[in-house]
Amino acid sequence: MENEQRIVSASGVVAAPAAEVFEQIADPALQPAWDGNDNLDHAEPGQRVTAVGDVFVMTNSGGNVRDNHVVEFEEGRRIAWLPSPQDADPPGHLWRWELEPVDETTTRVTHTYDWTNLRDETRLDRARRTTADRLQASVDRLAARVEELNAG
Protein backbone atom coordinates (compact mmCIF):
# COMPACT_ATOMS: atom_id res chain seq x y z
CA MET A 1 0.00 0.00 0.00
CA GLU A 2 1.38 3.32 -0.99
CA ASN A 3 1.72 6.04 1.66
CA GLU A 4 1.24 3.40 4.35
CA GLN A 5 2.35 4.42 7.85
CA ARG A 6 5.12 1.96 8.74
CA ILE A 7 6.32 3.57 11.96
CA VAL A 8 3.95 3.64 14.91
CA SER A 9 4.68 4.75 18.44
CA ALA A 10 3.10 5.49 21.77
CA SER A 11 4.30 7.34 24.86
CA GLY A 12 3.47 7.72 28.48
CA VAL A 13 4.84 8.90 31.79
CA VAL A 14 5.81 6.33 34.41
CA ALA A 15 6.05 7.24 38.09
CA ALA A 16 9.42 5.54 38.53
CA PRO A 17 13.09 6.27 37.87
CA ALA A 18 14.37 5.47 34.36
CA ALA A 19 16.71 2.75 35.67
CA GLU A 20 13.78 0.80 37.17
CA VAL A 21 11.69 1.11 34.02
CA PHE A 22 14.63 0.13 31.83
CA GLU A 23 15.26 -3.02 33.87
CA GLN A 24 11.81 -4.34 32.91
CA ILE A 25 12.60 -3.85 29.21
CA ALA A 26 16.26 -4.94 29.17
CA ASP A 27 15.51 -8.24 30.93
CA PRO A 28 13.56 -10.34 28.41
CA ALA A 29 12.32 -12.71 31.13
CA LEU A 30 10.28 -9.80 32.56
CA GLN A 31 8.70 -8.64 29.27
CA PRO A 32 5.79 -11.15 29.02
CA ALA A 33 4.30 -9.80 32.28
CA TRP A 34 3.47 -6.45 30.67
CA ASP A 35 3.42 -7.06 26.89
CA GLY A 36 0.44 -5.18 25.43
CA ASN A 37 0.47 -7.18 22.19
CA ASP A 38 -0.19 -10.38 24.16
CA ASN A 39 2.43 -11.92 21.89
CA LEU A 40 5.12 -12.99 24.36
CA ASP A 41 5.05 -16.28 26.25
CA HIS A 42 8.43 -16.55 27.96
CA ALA A 43 12.17 -15.98 27.86
CA GLU A 44 14.72 -17.85 29.91
CA PRO A 45 16.24 -15.89 32.81
CA GLY A 46 19.82 -14.66 32.53
CA GLN A 47 19.55 -12.88 29.18
CA ARG A 48 19.64 -9.29 30.45
CA VAL A 49 20.73 -7.09 27.54
CA THR A 50 23.91 -5.07 28.09
CA ALA A 51 25.12 -4.03 24.62
CA VAL A 52 24.50 -3.72 20.90
CA GLY A 53 25.18 -7.14 19.40
CA ASP A 54 23.50 -9.09 22.19
CA VAL A 55 20.90 -11.62 21.07
CA PHE A 56 18.12 -12.72 23.40
CA VAL A 57 15.74 -15.59 22.78
CA MET A 58 11.99 -15.22 23.31
CA THR A 59 9.18 -17.72 22.80
CA ASN A 60 6.02 -16.03 21.59
CA SER A 61 2.46 -16.96 22.46
CA GLY A 62 2.20 -19.08 19.30
CA GLY A 63 5.13 -21.21 20.46
CA ASN A 64 7.58 -19.77 17.93
CA VAL A 65 11.09 -19.13 19.19
CA ARG A 66 12.66 -15.82 18.09
CA ASP A 67 16.20 -14.50 18.21
CA ASN A 68 16.16 -10.79 19.00
CA HIS A 69 19.22 -8.95 17.70
CA VAL A 70 19.98 -5.82 19.74
CA VAL A 71 20.89 -2.98 17.35
CA GLU A 72 20.61 0.05 19.66
CA PHE A 73 21.55 0.23 23.31
CA GLU A 74 22.18 2.96 25.82
CA GLU A 75 21.87 1.78 29.43
CA GLY A 76 18.83 3.29 31.11
CA ARG A 77 17.81 5.26 28.00
CA ARG A 78 17.33 3.28 24.79
CA ILE A 79 17.11 -0.26 23.48
CA ALA A 80 16.00 -1.63 20.11
CA TRP A 81 16.05 -5.06 18.53
CA LEU A 82 15.30 -6.85 15.28
CA PRO A 83 13.47 -10.16 15.83
CA SER A 84 14.06 -13.14 13.56
CA PRO A 85 13.30 -16.84 13.41
CA GLN A 86 16.10 -18.74 15.11
CA ASP A 87 19.28 -18.98 13.05
CA ALA A 88 17.87 -16.70 10.33
CA ASP A 89 18.46 -13.12 9.28
CA PRO A 90 16.00 -10.58 10.70
CA PRO A 91 13.22 -9.81 8.19
CA GLY A 92 13.50 -6.09 8.94
CA HIS A 93 11.04 -4.98 11.62
CA LEU A 94 12.34 -3.16 14.67
CA TRP A 95 11.08 -2.68 18.23
CA ARG A 96 12.45 0.33 20.11
CA TRP A 97 12.08 1.68 23.64
CA GLU A 98 13.30 5.16 24.58
CA LEU A 99 13.34 6.50 28.13
CA GLU A 100 13.71 10.13 29.08
CA PRO A 101 13.90 11.04 32.76
CA VAL A 102 11.47 13.83 33.60
CA ASP A 103 12.97 14.04 37.09
CA GLU A 104 14.47 11.56 39.55
CA THR A 105 11.20 9.71 40.10
CA THR A 106 9.39 10.06 36.76
CA THR A 107 10.22 8.81 33.26
CA ARG A 108 8.73 9.49 29.83
CA VAL A 109 8.64 6.22 27.88
CA THR A 110 8.24 5.97 24.10
CA HIS A 111 7.66 2.62 22.39
CA THR A 112 8.07 2.40 18.61
CA TYR A 113 7.43 -0.33 16.06
CA ASP A 114 9.18 0.38 12.75
CA TRP A 115 8.53 -1.91 9.82
CA THR A 116 9.78 0.34 7.03
CA ASN A 117 12.46 -2.25 6.19
CA LEU A 118 10.29 -5.35 6.51
CA ARG A 119 11.12 -7.57 3.53
CA ASP A 120 9.05 -10.66 4.35
CA GLU A 121 5.66 -10.16 2.72
CA THR A 122 4.14 -12.96 4.80
CA ARG A 123 4.57 -10.69 7.85
CA LEU A 124 2.88 -7.59 6.42
CA ASP A 125 -0.64 -8.32 7.69
CA ARG A 126 0.63 -8.86 11.24
CA ALA A 127 2.79 -5.72 11.01
CA ARG A 128 -0.29 -3.71 10.00
CA ARG A 129 -2.14 -5.01 13.07
CA THR A 130 0.56 -3.62 15.37
CA THR A 131 -1.12 -0.29 15.99
CA ALA A 132 -0.33 2.62 18.27
CA ASP A 133 -3.11 1.33 20.56
CA ARG A 134 -1.27 -1.95 21.05
CA LEU A 135 1.97 -0.11 21.73
CA GLN A 136 0.14 2.12 24.19
CA ALA A 137 -1.14 -0.99 25.96
CA SER A 138 2.48 -2.09 26.46
CA VAL A 139 3.47 1.35 27.77
CA ASP A 140 0.49 1.39 30.13
CA ARG A 141 1.07 -2.16 31.39
CA LEU A 142 4.78 -1.45 31.84
CA ALA A 143 3.91 1.66 33.86
CA ALA A 144 1.45 -0.29 36.03
CA ARG A 145 3.98 -3.07 36.60
CA VAL A 146 6.84 -0.76 37.61
CA GLU A 147 4.59 1.43 39.77
CA GLU A 148 3.23 -1.70 41.48
CA LEU A 149 6.77 -2.93 42.19
CA ASN A 150 7.66 0.51 43.58
CA ALA A 151 4.63 0.50 45.88
CA GLY A 152 5.54 -2.91 47.27
Image: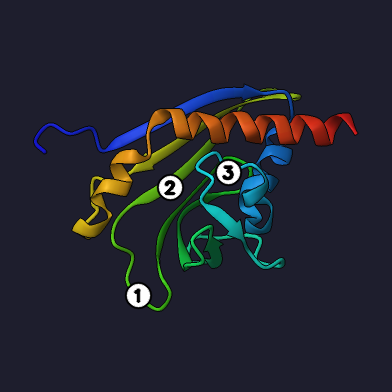
What is the distance, in whole Å, between disc 2 and disc 1 at their CAs? 17 Å
Q: For residue 95, which numbered disc appears in the image?
A: 2
Earlier in the chain: of badge 3 and badge 1, it is: 3
Q: Quadrant of residue 49?
A: bottom right
Q: Quadrant of residue 41?
A: bottom right
Residue hosting label 1:
88
Label 2 Cα crowd, 10 Å radius (few <14 / some 14-19 / many 20+):
some
SS of the residue under disc 3: loop
Q: Is residue 64 left or right of residue 6?
A: right
What is the distance, in whole Å, between disc 3 and disc 1 at their CAs? 24 Å
- Asked whether residue 99 is in view, the answer is no
Residue type (three-letter) at the residue carrying disc 2: Trp
Residue type (three-letter) at the residue carrying disc 3: Asp
- Asked whether residue 89 is in view, the answer is yes
What is the distance, in whole Å, between disc 3 and disc 2 at their CAs? 12 Å
Dots 2 and 1: beta carbons under 8 Å? no
Q: For residue 152, which numbered disc appears in the image?
A: none
Earlier in the chain: of badge 3 and badge 2, it is: 3
- Foreground mark, 3 or 1, reads 3
Q: Position of residue 114 (x, y in %)?
A: 33, 43
Residue hosting label 3:
35
When the figure is inspected, residue 10 is found, relative to residue 53, above or below; the finding is above
Q: Is residue 10 left or right of residue 115?
A: right
- Farthest residue toward the bottom? 87
